[in-house]
């Protein structure tokens, strides 16, 4: 799979007010936590939410990771009718929803929005792509990846296949 281009675009220079890092959080994916169930996402929005959650999983949001998310959407055929600028704007709109509704709420909605195994595997593949984009995978990101696997109901076999895809 192609890796993000260098140097990365700086998404923090987007229009004032449409990019706010206050949505970042370390996702615990705690099934005992109550989140609103009335929030709905389209499948593409759900995939972006998984990418944003992956970016924030270590508590450090880097521009290269946001760039990797925009690039990964193209790589994985998510939003195929949009050009790069439109994909970036789509990501910024989802970030805006995170600012308003919270990442926990949107992640719960994202899990509900992907009822099929292939879409859930795609979410895991996107998550892995984002986590490796900065060249580091801290323990917090590894733990997050396992929580996503469990939340999506991914089998151990599929998890190993996706996370070890570059080992072949």
Image (cartoon, rainbow, N blue to C red):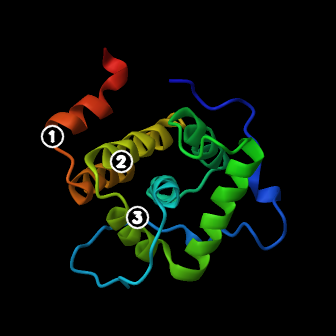
Residue 97 x/y as whole percent: 59, 74
Image point (38%, 85%), residue name: 36
Image point (29%, 58%), residue name: 115
Dot 2 falls on a residue whose secondary structure is helix
Work out how far the residue at label 3 is from the one at label 1, CA to CA, in angstroms.
21 Å
Image point (52%, 60%), residue name: 45
Looking at the image, the residue that sits furthest to the top is 168
Dot 3 falls on a residue whose secondary structure is helix
Mark positioned earlier in the residue sequence (3 or 1): 3
Residue at image mark 2: 119
Residue at image mark 3: 110
If the image is split into quadrants, where does the C terminus sit?
top left
Residue 93 x/y as whole percent: 66, 66
> Measured along the vertical axis of the image, is residue 109 above or below residue 159?
below
Mark positioned earlier in the residue sequence (2 or 1): 2
> Measured along the vertical axis of the image, is residue 82 above or below residue 104?
above
Residue at image mark 1: 156
Tell me: 103 left or right of 28: right
């Amino acid at each position: 799979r192609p890796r993000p281009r260098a140097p990365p675009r700086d998404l923090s220079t987007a229009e004032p007010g449409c990019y706010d890092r206050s949505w970042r959080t370390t996702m615990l994916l705690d099934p005992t936590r109550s989140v609103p169930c009335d929030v709905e996402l389209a499948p593409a929005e759900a995939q972006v939410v998984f990418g944003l959650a992956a970016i924030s999983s270590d508590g450090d949001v880097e521009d290269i990771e946001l760039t990797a998310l925009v690039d990964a959407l193209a790589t994985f055929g998510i939003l195929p009718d949009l050009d790069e600028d439109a994909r970036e704007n789509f990501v910024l709109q989802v970030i805006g929803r995170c600012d308003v509704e919270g990442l926990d709420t949107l992640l719960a909605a994202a899990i509900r929005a992907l009822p099929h195994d292939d879409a859930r595997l795609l979410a895991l593949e996107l998550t892995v792509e984002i986590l490796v984009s900065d060249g580091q995978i801290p323990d917090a990101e590894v733990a997050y990846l396992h929580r996503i696997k469990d939340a999506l109901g991914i089998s151990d076999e599929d998890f190993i296949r996706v996370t070890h895809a570059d080992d072949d």
